[in-house]
Image: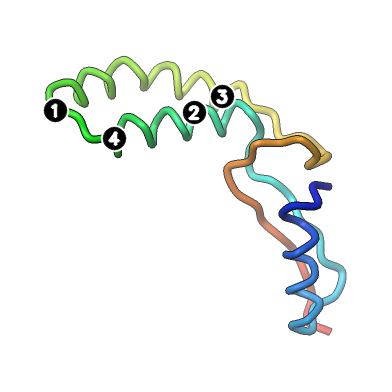
Amino acid sequence: MSIWYTFPLQRMLRASGYIGEEVHANGGWDASLGQMISLWVMRRPMPNALRNVLKYVSYPVVRFLVKRDKVPAELDWLMITSLWAIARKA
């Protein structure tokens, strides 16, 4: 598991009184790239006409990336979209 994200999250859960914490990723490299493309198209300052064209052009690419994404078992060397965790209150 990736030290950068999972260790601090596990430490916070333990400090709050939770046990058996498991941390997982929601997406891998392809989903992260799709998310970045979408964020760039939607948030970068640009004329509305250009934004509308880029939304139309990028949609199939982003959809393809999300469909082919595979969430890896190990979180090492990942670019992740988000994390989720399971823990039980002690």
Give the position of the C terminus as an image quadrant. bottom right
Q: Earlier in the sequence, mark 1 or mark 3?
A: 1
What residue do we see at 79% from left, 78% from top? 18
Whole-angstrom CA distance, mark 1 to mark 2, is: 22 Å
On screen, residue 57 versus residue 72, left or right, reads left
Choose mark 2 or mark 3, whichever is in front.
Answer: 2
The residue under label 3 is 67
Label 1 element class = loop
- In the rendered structure, which amino acid carries the disc numbered 2? Gly
Whole-angstrom CA distance, mark 2 to mark 3, is: 10 Å
Q: Earlier in the sequence, mark 1 or mark 2?
A: 2
Whole-angstrom CA distance, mark 3 to mark 4, is: 25 Å
Picture coordinates of residue 33 (x, y %)?
53, 28
Locate residue 16: give its quadrant.
bottom right
Label 4 element class = loop
Q: Earlier in the sequence, mark 4 or mark 2?
A: 2
Mark identifier at residue 44? 4
On screen, residue 34 versus residue 88, left or right, reads left
Picture coordinates of residue 70 (x, y %)?
69, 29
The residue under label 2 is 34
The residue under label 1 is 47
Picture coordinates of residue 38 (x, y %)?
39, 32
- In the rendered structure, which amino acid carries the disc numbered 4? Arg
Asked if marks 1 and 4 touch (Cβ < 8 Å), the reply is no
Q: Residue furthest right?
A: 20
Asked if marks 1 and 2 touch (Cβ < 8 Å), the reply is no
Locate residue 10: give its quadrant.
bottom right
- In the rendered structure, which amino acid carries the disc numbered 3? Lys
Choose mark 1 or mark 2, whichever is in front.
Answer: 1
